[in-house]
Image: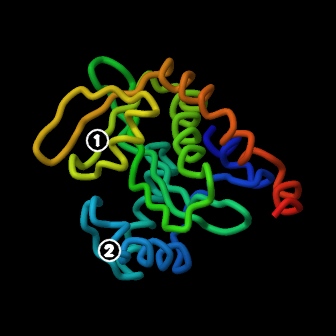
Amino acid sequence: MIHAAPGLDSRYRSYLRLLNADERDARYICELRSEETLNRYLNPSNNTVADQVHWLNAYKEREAEGKEYYFAIVSDGADQGVVRLYDFREVDGKRSFQWGSFIMPAPRIKGLVTYTAILMYELGFDILGFEQSHFEARAANATILAFHEREGARIVGRTEQDVFYRFYPEDYRRFREASAGQIAAHRVKASAATATR
């Protein structure tokens, strides 16, 4: 069950919190999506709190059915962004998932972007048992393309607008091993992290 996943354990310095269908989380999403530098590569959305609450209510039904998960990224006791695990389906004969809707404003906590990606793959592969991840990124978003390719994602196609990737369990294991420092920095007990700030 996703609720018992290590990445959702609030005793750690950094973890994922399932979003709620309430005004607080809706307002937070609206604030993130209204920042032009953060949303230029995202699909457009209605950016009112009421619309977001409505969308989150529909999302919570999909969450209850195990079809999708939307998280706040929490670190050092505060929300630091959002990320989503979704589009669970068969792709090229393999059970596959996508992650995205990833928004993390500056200033970013060191290593938190990488740690969040690790948590997405941990949930997809270790907890939910998927065989691969499929996702795309905007071709103009050079920073995120470079990040995915550094983590080991494999390009399987491209259009003028998007680059399409696959990521497999063996890629995740290599990425996880190469990211041991970020994992260690963020998967420490919250009290220990607070004491060193």
> Is disc 2 placed on a helix, strand or loop?
helix
The reply to whether the C-beta atoms of the residues labelled 1 and 2 are less than 8 Å apart is no
**Residue situated in front as seen by the camera: 128 or 45:** 45
Numbered circle sitting on residue 174: none
Q: Which residue is mark 2?
A: 36
**The N terminus - image quarter:** top right
Of circles 1 and 2, which is in front? Answer: 2
Q: Residue at x 46, y 33 (%)?
A: 151
Give percent across and percent down for residue 154.
33, 26
Q: Residue at x 40, y 45 (%)?
A: 86
In the image, what residue type sits under mark 1? Glu
166 versus 13 height, above or below: above
Q: Residue at x 33, y 66 (%)?
A: 39
Q: Which residue is mark 1?
A: 136
**Residue situated in front as seen by the camera: 1 or 94:** 94
175 versus 190 height, above or below: above
Q: Residue at x 56, y 78 (%)?
A: 24
**The C terminus - image quarter:** bottom right
Q: Could you give the CA–CA distance between mark 1 and mark 2, rounded to whole angstroms? A: 20 Å
Q: Is residue 155 left or right of residue 27?
A: left
Chain-order first, disc 1 or disc 2: 2
73 versus 87 height, above or below: below
